[in-house]
Image (tube, rainbow, N blue to C red):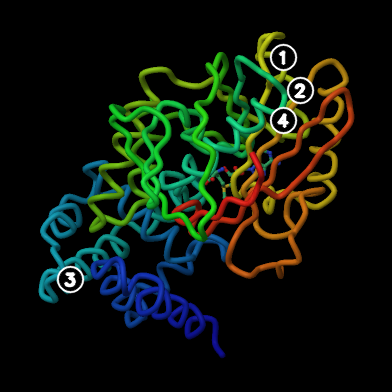
Amino acid sequence: MGRARALAQVYRHFGEVDAAETSPLYERVAVALSESDEALRAIEAAPARKRHPTVILAALHDLALAGRAPALAAAYAAADGDAADGDAAAGAAIDTLLRMTDSVVAIAVRRRTRTNETGRCAVLYPAIAEAARRVGANAVGLIDVGCSAGLNLNVDRAGITYSNGQSLGDPSSPVQLSSSIVGDRPIPTRAMPEVVARVGVDLDPVDVTDADDARWLRACLWPDQPERVARLEAEMALAATAPPLLLQGDAVEVVHDAFARVPADALPVVTTTWALSHFPLESRLRFLHRLDEAAAGRAVAWVSAEGVGVAPTIPTLGDRRASGHSIIGMAVFDRSALRAEAIGRCWSQGRLLAWLADS
Ligand SMILES: C[S@@+](CC[C@H](N)C(=O)[O-])C[C@H]1O[C@@H](n2cnc3c(N)ncnc32)[C@H](O)[C@@H]1O
């Protein structure tokens, strides 16, 4: 198969399969891109790993949000699922891509796509509270590794409701999340102790108080998903009221700096959500070793939500790798003795959750 044809198929598949159910707008735009030889040639100006529809569509959306592609912005704003509006938006997207190919490619090269609003906190909250209970901690310092924009660091400041009627967090928070419980085991509804430090670590952190970074987070959402846009806006506004400390660098090198920011009388709780698969295996093991080193002087907890078999030492429960769900792991390093267990499973980044641990 020729390269252009393979790229056309990627765009068609993205439109007809990935976007079809949730975004009629991107379905139409992606299919139109797949059918335009000129558009495909323009996309090929980007390096191969930056040609994916999620990247190119986010770069186009970023130009629209920045006021640099007003016709595209107007077409996206007008699209409400109607086929004619979708065709107009697709035309505007192709036109923008052809006129501003260099800008689209420059954005795609500089940025990574981000999607870290959603249900992660529904998983993290009960797991962090449980880790604190086991260690007997009255205060925690959160260290989110692979933090992207650090939205996980506001886990205690959101309100979370579960499909079985349970709730956690702040019911009056502007950020309200929900998660469906799978199975009949309730989640523990113990409140998290006071959070006294919030530190994010990432190779390339996103600062929600920076206008370009904040616009890029918006650009990564699909324009016709107003609920997700509203939730992201609320999460960014909340984060901006008390921005976390963001440490840039490889987690293996930087995480010890993060531990130093957590007061001695608080339990450092490291969190990783869908981050470790981006680390080579060797780095994952070195990262674990860093946690073990930090635990020489104090208890340390690690809460993870990662694909089956991705987080070292966390049991896989016999589940198959790449089976579409993730394992919620908890490891407590107490005076260098390590207790690691799988405390649950989750799907769709925490939109569905099965709790397994005794608590
Ligand atoms: C798929 S994103 C996950 C982001 C977020 N935790 C979430 O739940 O959506 C992976 C993140 O890990 C970061 N990352 C990858 N390798 C890293 C490393 N060695 N050290 C620190 N961060 C890393 C990337 O920059 C990216 O922001």
Residue labelled 2 has its Cβ within 8 Å of some atom of ligand 1 = no
Mark 4 or mark 1, earlier in chain: 1
Q: Is residue 103 visible?
A: no
Mark linked to residue 301: 4
Residue 262, quarter of the rendered image = top right
- Vertical side of 322 occupied by 313: above or below: above
Q: Give the class, few, some or many, for how many residues have Cα within 10 Å of label 2's Cα (few <14, many ≥20).
A: some
Q: Which residue is mark 2?
A: 256
Mark 1 or mark 3, earlier in chain: 3
Q: Which residue is mark 1?
A: 260
Q: Residue 16 at x, y = what percent?
A: 35, 79
**Of circles 2 and 3, which is in front?**
2
Mark 1 residue element: helix
Left-right relation of 62 to 13:
left
Residue 300, quarter of the rendered image = top right
Mark 4 or mark 3, earlier in chain: 3
Q: Residue at x 48, y 69 (%)?
A: 44
Which residue type carries mark 2? His
| Total residue callouts | 4
Q: Residue 74 at x, y = what percent?
A: 13, 54
Q: Give the class, few, some or many, for how many residues have Cα within 10 Å of label 1's Cα (few <14, many ≥20).
A: few
Q: Which residue is mark 3?
A: 86
Cα separation, mark 1 vs mark 3, equals: 52 Å
Q: Residue 255 at x, y = what percent?
A: 72, 27
